[in-house]
């Protein structure tokens, strides 16, 4: 099955590793696991992510057997991605968007694992997070999860087109656009009513703008071609370029996706309810 595969246009990705690389691109390139600033090795971890709860350090996800994920079984990988649990049974912080990846199909998770296991292993110990209590405690993550997290799978909507469903699957599950573009409450929980309406306090304290189709404060005035161009190049219709985390997920990830998939993401975004949110608009005062 699968939402992406067995459709016209996917002929090039034949091996599991090639399919996994495509999934990897669709996630935005797992950039939190590469310490670009300090010329860190690809996916070997150590990158600090600023959040209101302290600094989290991305982990080593290369296939090194001692310091990376080289000893993980398929089920270990799936448990981490869909339940936020490490092979040792410890709970991950919701900074790792397992809250979105939980909806991935098992097939796609295993492709992604095949790709990660094909990259060069790097020996590099993980750095402990530097957190403000109580989020620094396992018990905190466990309680958070009990209250706020439900393991689910992506359910296609049979009333919508194949293209819409593909866009929904990519945006909601793989690309996790909403994890950055939705504001969070004081417990770090996404505010459902403000889905995609932007967050002043996005990851690393950056503004992640409103990307609902609201004309005044969102991207309601962007055409499909505008959105596709943006996801390929980071250039906005007003010729502004993009910075920070967005340009990273574009360069390492979304720009490598097929035209049809970028159009599908745009179609999905345009179908969202428009939300007026001047606080997270890039359009000046509205
Ligand atoms: C890791 C966090 C992150 C993820 C994931 C992410 N974004 Fe962004 N996005 C940002 C940030 C931060 C900005 C602001 C960049 C800037 O101002 O240069 C941004 C800017 C944008 C803009 C420009 C809006 C405007 O009004 O200028 C659009 C459109 C956008 N993102 C769409 C998406 C879509 C679609 C996805 C998923 C396919 C996505 N983003 C995933 C963080 C993210």
Image: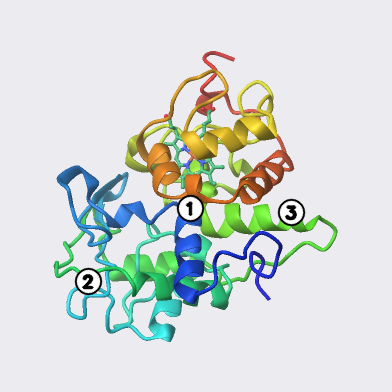
Q: Position of residue 166 (x, y in %)?
A: 68, 57
Residue 214 in the image, given as x and y percentages of width and height: 68, 29
Q: Is residue 6 visible?
A: yes
Looking at the picture, tell me which residue is in the foreground, 263 or 159: 263
Q: Is residue 11 above or below residue 250?
A: below
Q: Which residue is mark 1?
A: 189
Quadrant housing residue 77? bottom left
Crowdedness near tag 2: few (<14), some (14–19) or many (≥20) residues, C-alpha within 10 Å:
many
Label 1 CA crowd tier, 10 Å (few <14, some 14–19, many 20+): some
Separation of residues labelled 3 and 2 (CA atoms): 37 Å
Give the side of residue 199 with respect to residue 43, left or right.
right
Residue 197 in percent (x, y) is at: 58, 37
Which mark, by number, is residue 121? 2
> Label 3, on which residue?
163
Q: Quadrant for the N terminus, please.
A: bottom right
Q: Is residue 240 above or below residue 40?
A: above
């Amino acid at each position: 099955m699968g939402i992406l595969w067995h459709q016209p246009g996917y002929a090039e990705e034949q091996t599991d590793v090639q399919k996994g690389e495509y999934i990897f691109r669709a996630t935005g390139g797992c950039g939190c696991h590469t310490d670009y600033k300090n010329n860190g090795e690809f996916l070997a971890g150590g990158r600090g992510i600023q959040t209101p709860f302290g600094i989290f350090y991305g982990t080593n996800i290369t296939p090194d057997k001692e310091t990376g994920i080289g000893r993980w079984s398929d089920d270990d990988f799936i448990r981490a991605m869909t339940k936020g649990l490490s092979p040792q049974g410890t709970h991950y912080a919701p900074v790792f968007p397992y809250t979105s990846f939980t909806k991935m199909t098992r097939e796609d998770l295993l492709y992604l694992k095949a790709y990660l296991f094909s990259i060069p292993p790097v020996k590099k110990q993980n750095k402990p997070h530097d957190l403000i209590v109580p989020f620094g405690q396992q018990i905190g993550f466990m309680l958070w999860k009990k209250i706020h997290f439900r393991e689910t799978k992506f359910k296609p909507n049979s009333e919508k087109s194949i293209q819409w469903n593909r866009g929904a699957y990519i945006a909601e599950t793989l690309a996790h656009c909403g994890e950055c573009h939705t504001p969070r409450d004081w417990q770090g929980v996404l505010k459902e009513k403000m889905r995609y309406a932007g967050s002043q306090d996005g990851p690393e304290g950056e503004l992640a703008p409103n990307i609902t189709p609201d004309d005044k404060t969102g991207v309601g005035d962007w055409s499909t071609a505008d959105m596709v161009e943006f996801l390929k190049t980071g250039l906005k219709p007003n010729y502004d370029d993009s910075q920070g985390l967005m340009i990273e997920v574009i360069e390492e990830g979304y720009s490598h996706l097929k035209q049809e998939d970028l159009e599908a993401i745009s179609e999905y975004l345009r179908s969202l309810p428009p939300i007026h949110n001047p606080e997270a608009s890039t359009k000046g005062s509205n």
